[in-house]
Image (cartoon, rainbow, N blue to C red):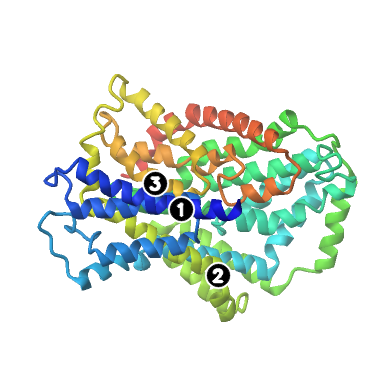
Amino acid sequence: MKGKVSLAKLIAPIFTGLFVYACSYIFADYSVLSMNAWIFVSIFAALVVGLILEPMPPAFLGIIAIALAVLFKVGPVKSGEVSAKISAEAAINWGLTGFSNSVVWLIFASFMIGIGYQNSGLGKRIALILVNKLGKSTLGLGYAIAIADLILAPFIPSNAARSGGTIYPIAMSIPTMYDSSPEKEPRKVGAYIAWVSLATTCISSSIFLTGQAPNPLALEILSKSGIAVVDWMGWFLCFLPVGIILFLITPLLTYYIYPPEVKGSSKISAWAKEELTKLGSIKPKELLMLSISVLALILWIGSKKFGVSATTTALIVIVLMIVTNIITWNDFLANKPAWNVLTWFATLVTMAGGLKNVGFLDFLSKYTDSLLSGFSPTTAVFVLLLVFCLLRYFFASGTAYVTAVVGVFAIIAGKIEGFDASFIMMFLLAPMGMISVLTPYGTGHSPIWFASGYIKGSEFWKLGAIFGAIYLLIYTLIAYPWFKFIIPHIFS
Protein backbone atom coordinates (compact mmCIF):
# COMPACT_ATOMS: atom_id res chain seq x y z
CA MET A 1 0.00 0.00 0.00
CA LYS A 2 2.81 2.37 0.84
CA GLY A 3 4.37 1.94 -2.61
CA LYS A 4 1.01 2.63 -4.30
CA VAL A 5 0.53 5.79 -2.28
CA SER A 6 4.01 7.00 -3.20
CA LEU A 7 3.39 6.26 -6.87
CA ALA A 8 0.09 8.15 -6.73
CA LYS A 9 1.81 11.11 -5.12
CA LEU A 10 4.44 11.04 -7.82
CA ILE A 11 1.93 10.83 -10.68
CA ALA A 12 -0.46 13.50 -9.34
CA PRO A 13 1.80 16.54 -10.01
CA ILE A 14 2.66 15.24 -13.49
CA PHE A 15 -1.00 14.65 -14.28
CA THR A 16 -1.88 18.13 -12.99
CA GLY A 17 0.72 19.77 -15.18
CA LEU A 18 -0.42 17.87 -18.27
CA PHE A 19 -4.07 18.62 -17.51
CA VAL A 20 -3.45 22.37 -17.20
CA TYR A 21 -1.43 22.30 -20.41
CA ALA A 22 -4.27 20.44 -22.15
CA CYS A 23 -6.62 23.23 -21.09
CA SER A 24 -4.62 25.59 -23.30
CA TYR A 25 -6.10 23.80 -26.33
CA ILE A 26 -9.61 24.20 -24.94
CA PHE A 27 -9.19 27.89 -24.15
CA ALA A 28 -6.84 28.53 -27.06
CA ASP A 29 -7.08 32.30 -27.28
CA TYR A 30 -3.34 32.89 -27.32
CA SER A 31 -3.81 36.61 -27.75
CA VAL A 32 -5.00 36.62 -24.11
CA LEU A 33 -2.60 34.02 -22.69
CA SER A 34 0.17 32.74 -24.93
CA MET A 35 1.35 29.15 -25.28
CA ASN A 36 4.51 30.04 -23.37
CA ALA A 37 2.41 31.35 -20.50
CA TRP A 38 0.33 28.15 -20.47
CA ILE A 39 3.53 26.10 -20.28
CA PHE A 40 4.71 28.10 -17.28
CA VAL A 41 1.33 27.87 -15.53
CA SER A 42 1.34 24.10 -16.10
CA ILE A 43 4.73 23.80 -14.44
CA PHE A 44 3.61 26.01 -11.56
CA ALA A 45 0.41 24.00 -11.01
CA ALA A 46 2.39 20.76 -10.93
CA LEU A 47 4.78 22.35 -8.41
CA VAL A 48 1.94 23.36 -6.08
CA VAL A 49 0.42 19.87 -6.12
CA GLY A 50 3.88 18.44 -5.51
CA LEU A 51 4.40 20.75 -2.53
CA ILE A 52 1.09 19.61 -1.07
CA LEU A 53 1.69 15.87 -1.55
CA GLU A 54 5.50 15.90 -1.18
CA PRO A 55 6.42 12.83 -3.23
CA MET A 56 9.97 14.22 -3.13
CA PRO A 57 11.72 16.81 -0.92
CA PRO A 58 10.05 20.21 -1.55
CA ALA A 59 13.34 21.95 -2.35
CA PHE A 60 14.09 19.36 -5.03
CA LEU A 61 10.63 19.88 -6.52
CA GLY A 62 11.44 23.59 -6.71
CA ILE A 63 14.67 22.86 -8.59
CA ILE A 64 12.78 20.61 -11.03
CA ALA A 65 10.24 23.38 -11.68
CA ILE A 66 12.97 25.97 -12.28
CA ALA A 67 14.88 23.59 -14.55
CA LEU A 68 11.77 22.97 -16.68
CA ALA A 69 10.89 26.67 -16.86
CA VAL A 70 14.45 27.54 -17.90
CA LEU A 71 14.56 24.67 -20.40
CA PHE A 72 11.37 25.91 -22.10
CA LYS A 73 12.52 29.54 -21.66
CA VAL A 74 9.33 30.58 -19.88
CA GLY A 75 9.23 32.70 -16.74
CA PRO A 76 11.32 35.79 -17.49
CA VAL A 77 9.64 39.11 -18.24
CA LYS A 78 7.95 39.07 -21.67
CA SER A 79 8.51 35.31 -22.09
CA GLY A 80 4.74 34.95 -22.04
CA GLU A 81 4.27 37.03 -25.16
CA VAL A 82 3.22 35.22 -28.30
CA SER A 83 6.28 36.21 -30.34
CA ALA A 84 8.74 36.26 -27.44
CA LYS A 85 12.26 34.99 -28.09
CA ILE A 86 14.18 34.56 -24.85
CA SER A 87 17.86 33.62 -24.94
CA ALA A 88 19.21 30.71 -22.93
CA GLU A 89 21.31 33.13 -20.88
CA ALA A 90 18.30 35.31 -20.04
CA ALA A 91 16.33 32.24 -19.02
CA ILE A 92 18.96 30.90 -16.60
CA ASN A 93 19.63 34.37 -15.19
CA TRP A 94 15.95 34.61 -14.38
CA GLY A 95 15.90 31.08 -12.95
CA LEU A 96 18.59 31.97 -10.42
CA THR A 97 17.15 35.33 -9.31
CA GLY A 98 15.62 33.81 -6.18
CA PHE A 99 19.09 33.03 -4.84
CA SER A 100 19.88 36.75 -4.76
CA ASN A 101 16.62 37.65 -3.03
CA SER A 102 17.12 39.42 0.30
CA VAL A 103 14.05 37.85 1.95
CA VAL A 104 15.26 34.34 1.10
CA TRP A 105 18.59 35.13 2.76
CA LEU A 106 16.79 36.58 5.79
CA ILE A 107 15.01 33.27 6.31
CA PHE A 108 18.23 31.33 5.75
CA ALA A 109 20.16 33.51 8.21
CA SER A 110 17.44 33.19 10.83
CA PHE A 111 17.74 29.41 10.72
CA MET A 112 21.43 29.83 11.47
CA ILE A 113 20.55 32.01 14.47
CA GLY A 114 18.53 29.09 15.81
CA ILE A 115 21.71 27.00 15.85
CA GLY A 116 23.30 29.72 17.97
CA TYR A 117 20.58 29.37 20.61
CA GLN A 118 21.01 25.61 20.61
CA ASN A 119 24.82 25.59 20.74
CA SER A 120 25.08 28.27 23.40
CA GLY A 121 22.42 26.64 25.59
CA LEU A 122 20.65 29.99 25.97
CA GLY A 123 17.31 28.71 24.65
CA LYS A 124 17.26 25.81 27.10
CA ARG A 125 18.26 28.05 30.02
CA ILE A 126 15.51 30.57 29.26
CA ALA A 127 12.89 27.83 29.19
CA LEU A 128 14.10 26.25 32.44
CA ILE A 129 14.25 29.59 34.28
CA LEU A 130 10.66 30.31 33.33
CA VAL A 131 9.48 26.83 34.34
CA ASN A 132 11.31 27.21 37.65
CA LYS A 133 9.69 30.57 38.38
CA LEU A 134 6.18 29.87 37.11
CA GLY A 135 5.86 26.09 37.26
CA LYS A 136 4.40 25.73 40.75
CA SER A 137 0.94 25.64 39.19
CA THR A 138 -0.10 23.99 35.96
CA LEU A 139 -1.49 27.30 34.70
CA GLY A 140 1.81 28.97 35.55
CA LEU A 141 3.59 26.23 33.64
CA GLY A 142 1.44 27.04 30.61
CA TYR A 143 2.54 30.67 30.78
CA ALA A 144 6.17 29.64 31.24
CA ILE A 145 6.00 27.64 28.00
CA ALA A 146 4.28 30.53 26.22
CA ILE A 147 6.82 33.12 27.36
CA ALA A 148 9.78 30.90 26.43
CA ASP A 149 8.43 30.49 22.91
CA LEU A 150 7.69 34.22 22.65
CA ILE A 151 11.27 35.12 23.56
CA LEU A 152 12.70 32.76 20.94
CA ALA A 153 10.19 33.52 18.17
CA PRO A 154 11.81 36.68 16.70
CA PHE A 155 15.10 34.86 16.18
CA ILE A 156 14.04 31.36 15.11
CA PRO A 157 11.64 31.40 12.14
CA SER A 158 11.30 27.63 12.16
CA ASN A 159 8.50 27.00 14.62
CA ALA A 160 9.38 23.32 14.36
CA ALA A 161 12.92 24.10 15.52
CA ARG A 162 12.02 26.36 18.43
CA SER A 163 8.91 24.53 19.61
CA GLY A 164 9.99 21.02 18.72
CA GLY A 165 13.72 21.46 19.23
CA THR A 166 13.85 23.62 22.37
CA ILE A 167 10.47 23.58 24.12
CA TYR A 168 9.43 19.99 23.43
CA PRO A 169 12.27 18.15 25.26
CA ILE A 170 11.73 20.27 28.38
CA ALA A 171 7.93 20.29 28.34
CA MET A 172 7.62 16.54 27.72
CA SER A 173 9.89 15.77 30.66
CA ILE A 174 7.23 17.10 33.03
CA PRO A 175 4.21 14.73 32.59
CA THR A 176 6.26 11.69 33.65
CA MET A 177 6.62 13.26 37.11
CA TYR A 178 2.89 12.68 37.55
CA ASP A 179 2.84 9.30 35.86
CA SER A 180 0.99 10.91 32.97
CA SER A 181 1.67 9.35 29.58
CA PRO A 182 -0.18 9.07 26.27
CA GLU A 183 -1.41 5.63 27.35
CA LYS A 184 -2.03 6.36 31.02
CA GLU A 185 -3.93 9.44 32.23
CA PRO A 186 -2.84 11.86 29.50
CA ARG A 187 -5.28 14.48 30.79
CA LYS A 188 -3.49 14.64 34.14
CA VAL A 189 -1.05 17.22 32.82
CA GLY A 190 0.51 16.03 29.55
CA ALA A 191 -2.39 16.94 27.26
CA TYR A 192 -2.62 20.47 28.69
CA ILE A 193 1.09 21.06 28.17
CA ALA A 194 0.97 19.71 24.61
CA TRP A 195 -1.93 21.93 23.55
CA VAL A 196 -0.61 25.10 25.18
CA SER A 197 2.77 24.50 23.55
CA LEU A 198 1.23 24.06 20.12
CA ALA A 199 -1.28 26.93 20.35
CA THR A 200 1.12 29.53 21.75
CA THR A 201 3.64 28.80 18.99
CA CYS A 202 0.86 29.45 16.45
CA ILE A 203 0.31 32.87 18.08
CA SER A 204 4.01 33.78 18.19
CA SER A 205 4.28 32.74 14.54
CA SER A 206 1.90 35.58 13.71
CA ILE A 207 3.31 38.18 16.11
CA PHE A 208 6.69 38.41 14.39
CA LEU A 209 7.55 38.56 10.70
CA THR A 210 10.39 36.16 11.52
CA GLY A 211 8.10 34.00 13.68
CA GLN A 212 7.61 31.52 10.84
CA ALA A 213 9.23 31.20 7.44
CA PRO A 214 6.05 31.58 5.32
CA ASN A 215 5.49 35.15 6.60
CA PRO A 216 8.36 36.84 4.72
CA LEU A 217 7.81 34.52 1.76
CA ALA A 218 4.21 35.77 1.48
CA LEU A 219 5.37 39.40 1.55
CA GLU A 220 7.92 38.71 -1.15
CA ILE A 221 5.25 37.15 -3.38
CA LEU A 222 3.10 40.26 -2.83
CA SER A 223 6.02 42.51 -3.64
CA LYS A 224 6.57 40.60 -6.89
CA SER A 225 2.91 41.28 -7.66
CA GLY A 226 3.47 45.02 -7.30
CA ILE A 227 1.74 45.42 -3.93
CA ALA A 228 3.37 47.49 -1.18
CA VAL A 229 4.45 45.45 1.85
CA VAL A 230 5.43 46.18 5.45
CA ASP A 231 8.83 45.70 7.09
CA TRP A 232 9.66 43.77 10.28
CA MET A 233 8.41 46.53 12.58
CA GLY A 234 5.33 47.15 10.44
CA TRP A 235 4.29 43.50 10.71
CA PHE A 236 4.84 43.56 14.48
CA LEU A 237 2.70 46.68 14.93
CA CYS A 238 -0.09 45.29 12.77
CA PHE A 239 -0.56 42.16 14.86
CA LEU A 240 0.43 43.63 18.23
CA PRO A 241 -3.01 44.28 19.86
CA VAL A 242 -4.37 40.90 18.79
CA GLY A 243 -1.09 39.21 19.67
CA ILE A 244 -1.11 40.55 23.22
CA ILE A 245 -4.68 39.42 23.82
CA LEU A 246 -4.25 35.94 22.33
CA PHE A 247 -0.91 35.41 24.04
CA LEU A 248 -2.41 36.26 27.43
CA ILE A 249 -5.59 34.20 27.09
CA THR A 250 -4.30 31.02 25.42
CA PRO A 251 -2.93 29.21 28.51
CA LEU A 252 -5.97 30.34 30.51
CA LEU A 253 -8.40 29.39 27.75
CA THR A 254 -6.83 25.94 27.55
CA TYR A 255 -7.02 25.65 31.32
CA TYR A 256 -10.83 25.96 31.18
CA ILE A 257 -11.66 24.36 27.82
CA TYR A 258 -9.21 21.46 28.14
CA PRO A 259 -8.38 21.44 31.87
CA PRO A 260 -5.56 19.41 33.41
CA GLU A 261 -6.46 17.11 36.28
CA VAL A 262 -3.41 18.22 38.28
CA LYS A 263 -3.69 21.91 39.10
CA GLY A 264 -0.26 22.38 40.57
CA SER A 265 2.72 20.98 42.41
CA SER A 266 6.15 22.05 43.56
CA LYS A 267 7.65 19.06 41.71
CA ILE A 268 7.87 20.88 38.41
CA SER A 269 9.58 23.95 39.80
CA ALA A 270 11.99 21.79 41.78
CA TRP A 271 12.83 19.72 38.71
CA ALA A 272 13.55 22.85 36.65
CA LYS A 273 15.76 24.18 39.45
CA GLU A 274 17.67 20.90 39.50
CA GLU A 275 18.16 21.05 35.71
CA LEU A 276 19.42 24.62 36.00
CA THR A 277 21.88 23.50 38.64
CA LYS A 278 23.18 20.88 36.21
CA LEU A 279 23.68 23.62 33.62
CA GLY A 280 25.74 25.59 36.11
CA SER A 281 26.26 29.33 36.03
CA ILE A 282 25.57 31.22 32.84
CA LYS A 283 28.33 30.66 30.30
CA PRO A 284 30.19 33.35 28.32
CA LYS A 285 28.67 31.96 25.10
CA GLU A 286 25.18 32.44 26.50
CA LEU A 287 25.95 36.05 27.44
CA LEU A 288 27.38 36.65 23.99
CA MET A 289 24.32 35.09 22.34
CA LEU A 290 22.06 37.23 24.50
CA SER A 291 23.97 40.40 23.58
CA ILE A 292 23.90 39.55 19.88
CA SER A 293 20.15 38.86 20.08
CA VAL A 294 19.49 42.23 21.71
CA LEU A 295 21.56 43.93 19.01
CA ALA A 296 19.60 42.12 16.30
CA LEU A 297 16.28 43.12 17.85
CA ILE A 298 17.34 46.77 18.08
CA LEU A 299 18.43 46.81 14.44
CA TRP A 300 15.27 45.03 13.27
CA ILE A 301 13.01 47.43 15.15
CA GLY A 302 14.95 50.51 14.05
CA SER A 303 15.77 49.34 10.52
CA LYS A 304 14.48 52.54 8.90
CA LYS A 305 16.21 54.80 11.41
CA PHE A 306 19.56 53.02 11.18
CA GLY A 307 19.34 52.34 7.45
CA VAL A 308 20.09 48.64 7.94
CA SER A 309 17.83 46.06 6.30
CA ALA A 310 16.54 43.07 8.23
CA THR A 311 18.60 40.73 6.05
CA THR A 312 21.79 42.70 6.65
CA THR A 313 21.15 42.48 10.39
CA ALA A 314 20.71 38.70 10.19
CA LEU A 315 23.97 38.34 8.26
CA ILE A 316 25.76 40.49 10.85
CA VAL A 317 24.44 38.16 13.54
CA ILE A 318 25.86 35.14 11.69
CA VAL A 319 29.27 36.83 11.42
CA LEU A 320 29.24 37.71 15.12
CA MET A 321 28.23 34.18 16.13
CA ILE A 322 31.07 32.66 14.10
CA VAL A 323 33.66 35.22 15.25
CA THR A 324 32.70 34.63 18.90
CA ASN A 325 32.72 30.84 18.31
CA ILE A 326 29.07 30.41 19.28
CA ILE A 327 28.80 28.50 16.04
CA THR A 328 31.67 27.24 13.92
CA TRP A 329 32.09 27.43 10.17
CA ASN A 330 31.40 23.69 10.09
CA ASP A 331 28.11 24.33 11.93
CA PHE A 332 27.30 26.87 9.24
CA LEU A 333 28.06 24.43 6.43
CA ALA A 334 26.37 21.48 8.15
CA ASN A 335 23.05 23.21 8.86
CA LYS A 336 21.04 21.17 6.37
CA PRO A 337 17.63 22.67 7.26
CA ALA A 338 18.94 26.18 6.52
CA TRP A 339 20.44 25.24 3.15
CA ASN A 340 17.31 23.26 2.31
CA VAL A 341 15.13 26.29 3.05
CA LEU A 342 17.43 28.56 1.03
CA THR A 343 17.06 26.33 -2.03
CA TRP A 344 13.35 25.78 -1.47
CA PHE A 345 12.35 29.40 -0.99
CA ALA A 346 14.68 30.74 -3.69
CA THR A 347 12.97 28.55 -6.28
CA LEU A 348 9.47 29.40 -4.97
CA VAL A 349 10.11 33.15 -5.08
CA THR A 350 11.33 32.87 -8.66
CA MET A 351 8.38 30.73 -9.75
CA ALA A 352 5.86 33.02 -8.03
CA GLY A 353 7.38 36.04 -9.78
CA GLY A 354 7.09 34.22 -13.09
CA LEU A 355 3.29 34.20 -12.86
CA LYS A 356 3.29 37.96 -13.22
CA ASN A 357 6.02 37.96 -15.86
CA VAL A 358 4.10 35.68 -18.24
CA GLY A 359 0.88 37.66 -17.81
CA PHE A 360 -1.06 35.03 -15.86
CA LEU A 361 -2.00 37.37 -13.01
CA ASP A 362 -3.35 39.92 -15.49
CA PHE A 363 -5.26 37.11 -17.20
CA LEU A 364 -6.67 35.97 -13.86
CA SER A 365 -7.74 39.46 -12.86
CA LYS A 366 -10.09 39.65 -15.86
CA TYR A 367 -12.11 36.75 -14.49
CA THR A 368 -12.39 37.76 -10.83
CA ASP A 369 -14.63 40.81 -11.12
CA SER A 370 -17.82 38.89 -10.34
CA LEU A 371 -16.50 36.73 -7.48
CA LEU A 372 -17.56 39.15 -4.73
CA SER A 373 -20.37 40.88 -6.55
CA GLY A 374 -23.33 41.56 -4.30
CA PHE A 375 -21.17 42.17 -1.26
CA SER A 376 -20.39 45.55 0.20
CA PRO A 377 -16.63 46.33 0.19
CA THR A 378 -16.32 45.74 3.95
CA THR A 379 -18.26 42.48 3.80
CA ALA A 380 -16.12 41.38 0.86
CA VAL A 381 -12.96 41.87 2.94
CA PHE A 382 -14.34 39.69 5.74
CA VAL A 383 -15.49 37.02 3.29
CA LEU A 384 -11.98 36.95 1.84
CA LEU A 385 -10.51 36.58 5.33
CA LEU A 386 -12.81 33.67 6.16
CA VAL A 387 -12.08 31.86 2.88
CA PHE A 388 -8.35 32.53 3.21
CA CYS A 389 -8.33 30.99 6.69
CA LEU A 390 -10.56 28.00 5.89
CA LEU A 391 -8.32 27.05 2.96
CA ARG A 392 -5.70 26.22 5.59
CA TYR A 393 -7.48 22.91 6.11
CA PHE A 394 -6.33 21.77 2.66
CA PHE A 395 -2.60 22.38 3.09
CA ALA A 396 -0.05 20.43 5.11
CA SER A 397 2.60 23.08 4.58
CA GLY A 398 2.50 26.79 5.25
CA THR A 399 4.89 27.31 2.37
CA ALA A 400 2.70 25.39 -0.09
CA TYR A 401 -0.29 27.34 1.18
CA VAL A 402 1.42 30.69 0.63
CA THR A 403 2.73 29.70 -2.80
CA ALA A 404 -0.67 28.48 -3.98
CA VAL A 405 -3.06 31.16 -2.75
CA VAL A 406 -1.36 34.49 -2.03
CA GLY A 407 -1.04 35.58 -5.65
CA VAL A 408 -4.66 34.70 -6.39
CA PHE A 409 -5.99 36.55 -3.35
CA ALA A 410 -3.85 39.56 -4.23
CA ILE A 411 -5.66 39.77 -7.57
CA ILE A 412 -9.07 39.53 -5.90
CA ALA A 413 -8.09 42.10 -3.25
CA GLY A 414 -7.20 44.58 -5.96
CA LYS A 415 -10.78 44.40 -7.24
CA ILE A 416 -12.45 45.54 -4.00
CA GLU A 417 -13.35 49.19 -4.25
CA GLY A 418 -12.64 51.52 -1.36
CA PHE A 419 -9.72 49.46 -0.02
CA ASP A 420 -6.06 49.47 -0.91
CA ALA A 421 -4.80 46.00 -1.88
CA SER A 422 -1.89 46.33 0.59
CA PHE A 423 -4.38 46.85 3.45
CA ILE A 424 -6.48 43.83 2.50
CA MET A 425 -3.52 41.51 1.97
CA MET A 426 -1.88 42.45 5.25
CA PHE A 427 -5.24 41.83 6.93
CA LEU A 428 -5.27 38.36 5.40
CA LEU A 429 -1.61 37.48 5.95
CA ALA A 430 -1.17 38.56 9.58
CA PRO A 431 -3.17 35.64 11.07
CA MET A 432 -1.47 32.93 8.97
CA GLY A 433 0.49 31.55 11.89
CA MET A 434 -2.43 31.91 14.28
CA ILE A 435 -4.89 30.01 12.09
CA SER A 436 -2.56 27.04 11.64
CA VAL A 437 -3.94 25.92 15.01
CA LEU A 438 -6.81 24.37 13.03
CA THR A 439 -5.13 21.10 12.06
CA PRO A 440 -2.51 18.63 13.31
CA TYR A 441 -0.55 19.11 10.07
CA GLY A 442 -0.94 22.83 9.39
CA THR A 443 2.55 24.00 10.26
CA GLY A 444 6.01 22.70 11.15
CA HIS A 445 5.52 22.15 14.88
CA SER A 446 1.97 20.73 14.76
CA PRO A 447 2.92 17.14 13.84
CA ILE A 448 5.52 17.10 16.62
CA TRP A 449 2.98 17.80 19.37
CA PHE A 450 0.34 15.63 17.72
CA ALA A 451 2.82 12.75 17.55
CA SER A 452 3.44 13.06 21.30
CA GLY A 453 0.18 11.12 21.63
CA TYR A 454 -1.23 13.12 24.54
CA ILE A 455 -4.06 14.55 22.45
CA LYS A 456 -6.14 12.02 20.52
CA GLY A 457 -7.06 12.69 16.92
CA SER A 458 -10.72 13.59 17.50
CA GLU A 459 -9.82 15.86 20.41
CA PHE A 460 -7.13 17.57 18.36
CA TRP A 461 -9.54 18.44 15.55
CA LYS A 462 -12.17 19.61 18.04
CA LEU A 463 -9.70 21.84 19.89
CA GLY A 464 -8.41 23.20 16.59
CA ALA A 465 -11.91 24.20 15.51
CA ILE A 466 -12.76 25.79 18.88
CA PHE A 467 -9.53 27.75 19.25
CA GLY A 468 -9.51 28.65 15.55
CA ALA A 469 -13.01 30.12 15.84
CA ILE A 470 -12.17 32.04 19.01
CA TYR A 471 -8.92 33.36 17.56
CA LEU A 472 -10.57 34.42 14.33
CA LEU A 473 -13.43 36.17 16.15
CA ILE A 474 -11.02 38.14 18.34
CA TYR A 475 -8.85 38.93 15.33
CA THR A 476 -11.82 40.21 13.33
CA LEU A 477 -13.11 42.43 16.14
CA ILE A 478 -9.73 43.89 17.10
CA ALA A 479 -7.60 43.83 13.95
CA TYR A 480 -9.98 45.49 11.49
CA PRO A 481 -10.35 48.84 13.30
CA TRP A 482 -6.69 48.69 14.33
CA PHE A 483 -5.57 48.16 10.74
CA LYS A 484 -7.70 51.10 9.61
CA PHE A 485 -5.72 53.22 12.06
CA ILE A 486 -2.19 51.82 11.82
CA ILE A 487 -1.76 50.91 8.12
CA PRO A 488 -1.82 54.53 6.85
CA HIS A 489 0.88 55.41 9.41
CA ILE A 490 3.06 52.45 8.39
CA PHE A 491 2.94 53.32 4.71
CA SER A 492 3.20 57.10 5.18
Q: Which residue is mark 1?
A: 51
Q: Which badge, 3 or 2, comes first in the chain's sequence?
A: 2
Q: Quadrant of residue 47?
A: bottom left
Q: Nearer the viewer, residue 407 or 286?
A: 407
Q: Quadrant of residue 161?
A: bottom right
> Mark 2 is on which residue type?
Lys
Q: Which badge, 1 or 3, comes first in the chain's sequence?
A: 1
Contact between marks 3 and 2 (CB within 8 A): the answer is no
Residue 366 x, y percent position in the rendering: 20, 36
Horizontal placement of 82 versus 317: left or right? left
Q: Residues within 10 Å of mark 1 (few under 14, many from 20)?
A: many
Question: Which numbered tag is attached to residue 336?
Answer: 2
Residue 358 x, y percent position in the rendering: 21, 53
Q: Could you tell me how far apart the alpha carbons at marks 3 and 2 are, in whole angstroms? A: 25 Å
Q: Looking at the image, is 261 positioned above or below residue 444?
A: above
Residue at position x 48%, y 46% from top? 236
Q: Secondary structure at mark 3?
A: helix
Q: Secondary structure at mark 2?
A: helix
Q: Tell me if I can see residue 32 in this picture.
A: yes
> Mark 3 is on which residue type?
Ala
Contact between marks 1 and 3 (CB within 8 A): the answer is yes
> Mark 1 is on which residue type?
Leu
Residue at position x 49%, y 51% from top? 8
Q: Which residue is mark 3?
A: 404
Q: Which badge, 1 or 2, comes first in the chain's sequence?
A: 1
Q: Secondary structure at mark 1?
A: helix
Residue 436 x, y percent position in the rendering: 55, 41
Name the mark nearer the viewer: 1 or 3: 1
Residue at position x 30%, y 51% from top? 42
